[in-house]
Amino acid sequence: MPEGHTIHRLAADHFERFGGRPVRASSPQGKFSGSAALVDGRAMESTEAHGKHLFLGFGPLGWVHIHLGLFGKVTFGDAPAPPPTDTVRLRLAGPAAYVDLRGPTTCALITDGEKRAIHERLGPDPLRAADAAVASGGERAWDRISRSRTTIAALLMDQKIIAGVGNVYRAEVLFRHGIDPYRAGKDIRRAEWDAMWTDLVELMREGVRNNRIDTVRPQHTPEAMGRPPRVDDHGGEVYVYRRAQLPCHVCGGEIRTAGLAARNLFWCASCQQC
């Protein structure tokens, strides 16, 4: 499932290609046909992301709400657009570009009130300007974490507590701060949480800029360590994510893996003892 930085990047990419201009909208698959007919010919006035939710704004008509889930894919292309396949849930097309949406968990035309309800049930997003500061988003997340007996690894994946953090950022931020993933939220110190929140803001902003997740510090890059670069479908240089049974870049110990919060957790037992 895409993490929050990908959705924020998609919001920017949609507005860059279609913002302020009328779009042609269709649903070759048929599941969004009625709403696509309403969107067709209207200008995309704004785009927005919150966690893993993408919103495309069409003024008084409302918002196209998209959640990619595990299988959703977005494909951009240059005009003229080729004939769409019947797996395309939504195609938006303009004079210079088109975009196809396939397999999302959610693709719905919603009102301002419905959109507001989605925001209200989500936690703060490190990539939203109003949430980025420790004193705002970090404080709200801390209020939930500091009272919880649930593991910090599970809490980081709870979108009601923090929106946009997925399995990669969870594993990596815990490693970068030497936090045992099985520690309860109530046992995390406030200074530790503030440092993790600040780190998430910086790492996820870099993810938006580079369109990939890189979490290793300069002294642990392939160039600095004289090691081969990581080869993985997810790309990016990481410490522990999907590196089970490989040596830790810091201590040389074996990276471990286990199931937690319905996803595979990765960590270094030597580096993450506190």
Image (cartoon, rainbow, N blue to C red):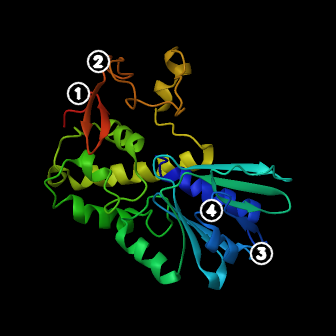
Q: Earlier in the sequence, mark 1 or mark 4?
A: 4
Mark 1 → mark 4, Cα distance in angstroms? 50 Å
Tell me which amino acid carries mark 1: Ala
Q: Amino acid at mark 3?
A: Gly
Which mark, residue 41?
3
Which quarter shows the C terminus? top left
Quick one: label 1 or label 2, which is nearer the N terminus?
Answer: 2
Q: Earlier in the sequence, mark 1 or mark 3?
A: 3
> Residue drawn at (63%, 57%), measured in percent from left and top?
29
Q: What label does residue 156 carry, if any?
A: none
Residue on which disc 4 sits: 30
Dot 1, how many residues are within 10 Å of its Cα: few (below 14), some (14-19), or many (20+)?
some
Q: Are marks 4 and 3 in contact (CB under 8 Å)?
A: no
Please count the marks in the image: 4
The picture places residue 162, in percent across and down from the top left corner, at: 35, 59
- Label 4 to label 3, Cα distance in Å? 18 Å
Tag 2 near tag 4, CB within 8 Å:
no
Does 201 sit left or right of 274 as displayed? right
Q: Amino acid at mark 2?
A: Gly
Label 2: element kind: loop
Per the image, label 4 sits on a secondary structure element best described as loop
| x 74%, y 51%: residue | 84
Give the crowd class for mark 2: few <14, some 14-19, many >=20 residues within 10 Å.
some
Q: Which residue does the numbered mark 1 point to in the structure image?
A: 269
For badge 4, the amino acid type reads: Gly
